[in-house]
Image (cartoon, rainbow, N blue to C red):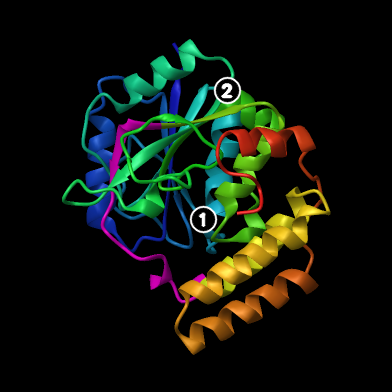
Amino acid sequence: MPRIGVVIVTMGTRPQELDALLESVAQQSVPAARVVVVGNGTPLAGVPKWVTRVPLEENLGCPGGRNVGLQLLLESGDVDVVVELDDDGLLIADDVFARVQRLYAADPGLGIVSFRVVDEQGRTLRRHVPRLRAGDPLRRGLVTAFLGGGHALSARMLRQIGDWPGHFFFEHEETDLAWRALDAGWDILYEPDLVLQHPRTLPDRHAVHYRLTARNRVWLARRRLPAVLVPAYLAVWIAITLARTHSAAALRAWAAGFWEGIRTPCGPRQPMRWRTAWRMTRLGRPPVI
């Protein structure tokens, strides 16, 4: 059966939540081969000794911190599947890793598995269902995106397509990785039976949310879309943002990020193939939204 590794990135601001998460990891019926906790600018005081601790002197952002953990696990050769979890999440069942094992053992083409995120009352927000028609969060199936808070990644896939875009720092790094996985022929599965409990929060709780959302969306389009789709994708998201955002300060931050995305380097350009765009369309989410 596939060996499971775990990566958790923390800034050291949620010690109680991290302790609870690690306890839920330790109680899994199938033990993880290795658990890595990466401290983004924190010394990781109080983390259990059975955990591999990697304190970083600076905050590399969510994708940058995850890359540190991924590199350690992939270079060691100890794992076949990497489960990444938010440090304020909680595994409320003890068979999550066992289910992940069975999914990857049954399908060698499975690249990414997206967990279902629920709040303290067991409810799943629409934005936590990785498809456009999100009315039924219990409907499983192949999708074109996944949730960063709780997911599993094939080690073989990561060796083929590469790791997270670390320079994104925060926002849309999951979409960049998902599009690369799809373009390489891997499947992404939304599995609602795999549950991560997570406090009910809003994305704009982060001060940089609007700026980085806009900047990284432009970077994403420049990096991954065929040239003819770039203006269509950005135009759709300009319209959506104007319709959703009612704060002048938020719109100013978003506009500054959008301009930053246009004028700054986005990293290597590797646009997806047209057959990938058609595959995404058949899965219900064409790459213009």
For the point 72% across and 56% down, the residue is 221
Classed neighbour count for the residue bearing mark 1: other residues with Cα under 10 Å, few (<14), some (14–19), many (≥20): many
The span shown in magenta is: 191-209
**What residue did someone put label 2 on?**
77
Q: Is mark 2 on a helix, strand or loop?
A: loop
Residue hosting label 1: 62
Q: Which of 147 and 96 is in front in this view?
A: 147
Secondary structure, mark 1, is helix
Q: Position of residue 239 (x, y in %)?
A: 59, 70
- At x 41%, y 47%, the residue is 149
Indicate whether residue 204 is drawn in magenta.
Answer: yes
Q: Disc 1 marks which amino acid?
A: Cys
Quadrant where the C terminus is found in the figure: bottom right
Task: Work out whether residue 8 or residue 178 is closer to the camera in this orientation and state it.
Answer: 178
Label 2 vs label 1: CA separation? 23 Å
Q: In which quarter of the image is residue 284?
A: top right
Callout 2 amino acid:
Gly
Foreground residue among 78 and 214: 214
Q: Where is residue 288 in the image (x, y as percent from the top left)?
A: 66, 53
Q: Identify which residue, 184 or 58, lies in the foreground.
A: 184
Q: Residue furthest left?
A: 121
Ranked by sequence position, the earlier of labels 2 and 1 is 1
Residue farthest toward the bottom in the current orientation of the protein: 248
Relative to 64, say whether 101 is above or below. above
On the rendered image, what quadrant is the N terminus found in? Answer: top left
Residue 223 makes an appearance in the image:
yes
**Residue 230's disc number:** none
Q: Within 10 Å of the Cα at label 2, are there few (<14), some (14-19), or many (20+) other Cα atoms?
A: few
| Image point (29%, 48%), residue name | 124
Residue 179 in the image: state x and y as whole percent: 65, 41
Q: In this view, does 274 lie to the left or right of 280?
A: right
Q: Is residue 243 above or below residue 26?
A: below
